Image (cartoon, rainbow, N blue to C red):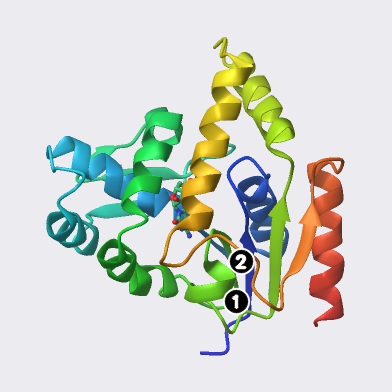
Amino acid sequence: TNVPVVTIDGPSGSGKGTVAALLAKEFDWHLLDSGALYRLTALAAMNHDVDFSDEKSLEVLAGHLDVQFEPGGEGETLKIILEGERVGANLRTEEVGAKASQIAALPGVRKALLQRQQDFAEAPGLVADGRDMGTVVFPQANVKVYLTASAEERAKRRQNQLQQKGIDASFDQLLGDIIARDDRDMNRDVAPLKPADDAIVLDSTRLSIQEVFSRVVDVMRQNG
Ligand code: C5P
């Protein structure tokens, strides 16, 4: 297909999810939060007591994932329905993120989720964020961005996010979690986190979300 695709890859906490959502809204394009699919697979595995070392069962689960994405009401976020039940804030917890990262290292699970991700590329366009959007899932994308930030800055952002929700978390604990997840995502054999050869690398350590957003919009305009 020749639907325009913009990919935003990077480590957790780099701001890629926020930037991707802003871009999709700006251009009225579809949005793929690929990390959510890995997180949902992990949640489904937890719900069904599937063993996290049982690759075959996890692969079947990923291939049959019963999930609907529904637009929320005015000012409301997307509704995610997993096996008939609305998924809450626990989808975004570090525990589920770590479990998602564990199953994301399994080739069978990645293969089972590939087509489902590619199906999001529908007119008028798609913004996809994740770890391998530009390298594996949408190698033909028109614009590829690799968004990064120092681990300390990402831990600080995460701590602020949690504080806003009234949750006190230890900085050292958060930093340790981030470094462990980066390490797993960057050093796995299949679809490791890395910039595509033709990606634009942006470091958001000292950039606001708005600045990152404007830079990507500029690149998109240059690419027609
Ligand atoms: O981006 P998010 O933190 O929601 O992703 C959760 C985990 O899912 C990541 O740590 C990564 O291991 C995995 N993932 C992946 N490929 C993607 C998106 C997410 O392997 N395209």
Q: Nearer the viewer, residue 51 or 137?
A: 51
The kind of residue tagged 2 is Trp
Element under disc 2: loop
Q: Residues within 10 Å of mark 1 (few under 14, many from 20)?
A: few
Whether residue 76 is visible here, answered yes or no, is no
Tell me: residue 199, above or below residue 206. Answer: below
> To which quarter of the image does residue 90 belong?
top left
Q: Position of residue 30 (x, y in %)?
A: 55, 65
Label 2 and label 1: CA atoms lie apart by: 6 Å
> To which quarter of the image does residue 60 belong?
bottom left
Which numbered marker is on residue 124? 1
Q: Where is residue 89 in the image (x, y as percent from the top left)?
A: 42, 29
Q: Residues within 10 Å of mark 2 (few under 14, many from 20)?
A: many
* 197 sits to left or right of 54: right
Query: Which residue corresponds to the image point at 12% horizontal and 37% vertical from the top-left?
Result: 49
Query: Which residue corresponds to the image point at 31% horizontal and 51% vertical from the top-left?
Result: 103
Tell me: residue 27, above or below residue 211. Answer: below
Q: Which of 42 and 1 is in front in this view?
A: 42
The kind of residue tagged 1 is Pro
Tell me: residue 28, above or below residue 77. Answer: below
Q: Position of residue 27 (x, y in %)?
A: 70, 65
* 76 sits to left or right of 207: left
The residue beneath circle 2 is 29
